[in-house]
Image (tube, rainbow, N blue to C red):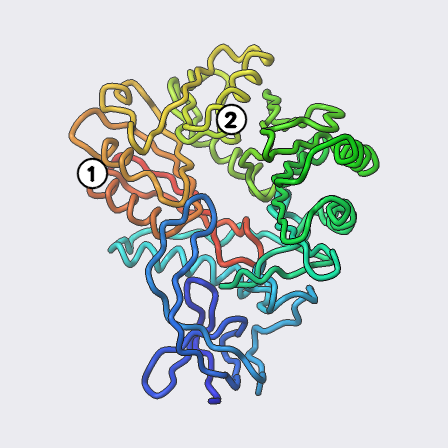
Amino acid sequence: MSDVRIEGLGSAGDGIAVLDGKTVHVPFTAPGDVVRIELSHQPRKSGGRGRGRPDTAAVAPKHRVVKLVSAGPDRVAPPCPHFGRCGGCALQHLSADFLADWKRDQAVVALERRGITDVVVDETFRGGPGRRRRVSLTAQVGGRKSVAIGFHERGSRNLIDIGPCPVLEPTLEALIAPLRSLLAAHLAPREAARISINMTDSGADMLLEAEMRQGADLFMDLAEFAETHDLARLTLTGRDGETPIGARRQPVLEWPGLTIAPPPGAFLQTDRRVEAELRRRIGLAAAGAGSVADLFCGVGTLTAGIPAGAEVLAIDSAADAVQALRTGADKARRTNITTSTRNLTRDPLSAVEIAALDLVIMDPPAAGARSQVEVLAGAGAQVPRIAYASCAPGTFARDARILIDGGYRLVSLTPFDQFHWSPEIELFGLFELA
C-alpha cells in the first residue's frame, strides 16, 4: 500500500497521481485528495460506452482506495449509497462547480490534441440530479431466487443491486423496486433481463428484453404492472420476437410543431433541458436557411428545431426511427420534411447532394462522422454552415480538424453536462466557411 496525492482527473474521471515516477489512476478520487491505495497490476481493456464508443485500447490499471487520508477542496459527500460500487456514476464526489469546469476543460484538451487552439469554448451548460429521462437496467437472478436490478460494477460483470438512484427522474426511479418484484416471479435461475425505459411526454415507455417463458401468467402480470404504474407502453422482446403488452396509450414526444411516437427502445436525448437547449440552438443556426439536411436524425429531436420555412432532408440508418419521424411530420402536415433511411457512415451525402444546402446538422454516434465530414471538407460544393452535436470529444475534435483543414472555422463550441455525474460530455459546435 502507498499514499499518493491526486493531482488531477483523467478523461475517464479517474484521479491521476504519480508513484515512483509512474502515473497511476485511482477511481473515485478528487484533485487534492491524499489517499492510501492498494496497487493493482492488471491492465484492463477500456469498455465501449454510449452509442458505439470506439475505444478498445489497453488502459492503465486502476488502483483501489483503502483510506482517504485527507480530502481535496472540491470533494463533496456523494448522495447515493451505491456510489463507489455501482458503475452508473463516476463523479458524485465532486462539487458542481468543479464538475462543470472539468467538463469544459475536457473539450479544450480534446481540441488542443488536434492542434485547435483558437476557439473560445463556452462555459458548460450544467446538468443536475434527477434529470435523466432514459435508462438501461440489467436484472438477474441471484441466490434464493432473489433478483438484483441495477448497473454493473465498473470493469466487472458483477451486478450492483440498487435502491435509490438520484440521477434519474423521480418517476423513473420509482419503477425500480416494483420491477424487482415483478421479475422475481418470472425469471428462472441464472436468467437475466435487460430493461430500457424512456420517459416520454405521455408516460414511461418500457422495453423488456428477456428469454422468459411466455404464457398467460406472464402476460397478465406485465399488463397489471403497466396498469398499476401508469406506463404508456410495455413491450416484451425475447424468444418469440417482439410482443406489445399493456399499450395503454401512445408514447409521444411533444416538440414545437411536431409530435413523434417513438418506437420501443428509441434513442432519446438523456436530459430534457439539454434537449430543449440543443433545439433552440438549431433554430438559431437554421435562421434564414432555405435548405437543411439533418444527418443521423434519429426520431427527429433536432429536426423539430428547424424553422418550418426551410426544406429539410432528415436521414438516419434506423428505419423505425425514420418512420416515426415520417409519421409525425405527415400528421403535422410538415410537407417541408423529407425523410430517408441511409447508412451515412458507408454512404455519406455526396458533394452533388450537398451543393444546394444552406446548413448541415449532424448528431452522429460516438464514432463520429468522418466519412461525411471528409465530403463536406472536400474540393466540391461546400455548405456555408454546419451544426455538429457530439457525445465524444475525441471524435468531434478529429472531425473538427478535417473541417478546419477544408476551409471551415469553428465559431462556437459549448459543452453540455447531459450525463450528470458521468465523465461523458455532449458538445455542440457551429462551423462556418472561413
The answer to whether one can see residue 115 in this image is yes
Residue located at (58% from left, 35% from top)? 265
Q: Which amino acid type is marked by label 2?
A: Ala
- Whichever of callouts 2 and 1 sits on the residue coming sooner in the sequence is 2
Local secondary structure at mark 1:
loop
SS for tag 2? helix
Residue 191: % across, % down: 63, 49
Judged by depth in the image, the label closer to the viewer, 2 or 1, is: 2
Residue at left offset 61%, top offset 27%:
255
As drawn, the label of residue 406 is 1
| Image position, residue 97 (x, y; %) | 56, 63
Q: Is residue 190 above or below residue 241?
A: below
Name above or below for residue 35 compared with residue 291: below
Instruction: Please tell me which residue lies in front, 320 or 22.
Output: 320
Q: Can you give x and y, in whole percent of width and height, for residue 217 in the image?
A: 79, 34
Q: Nearer the viewer, residue 37 or 181?
A: 181
Q: Classify mark 1: residues with Cα within 10 Å, few (<14), some (14-19) or many (20+).
A: some
| Position in image of residue 178 (x %, y %) | 78, 47
Question: In the rendered view, does 289 fall on the left or right side of 153?
Answer: left
The relative height of residue 80 versus residue 357 in the rendered view (above or below) is below
Q: Which residue is mark 2?
A: 321
Instruction: Tell me whether the residue at label 2 lies in contact with that at label 1, contact meaning CB atoms closer than 8 angstroms.
Output: no
Disc 2 from disc 1: Cα separation: 32 Å
Residue type at mark 1 is Gly
Decide if residue 196 is on the left or right side of residue 217: left
**Residue drawn at (43%, 43%) of the image:** 428
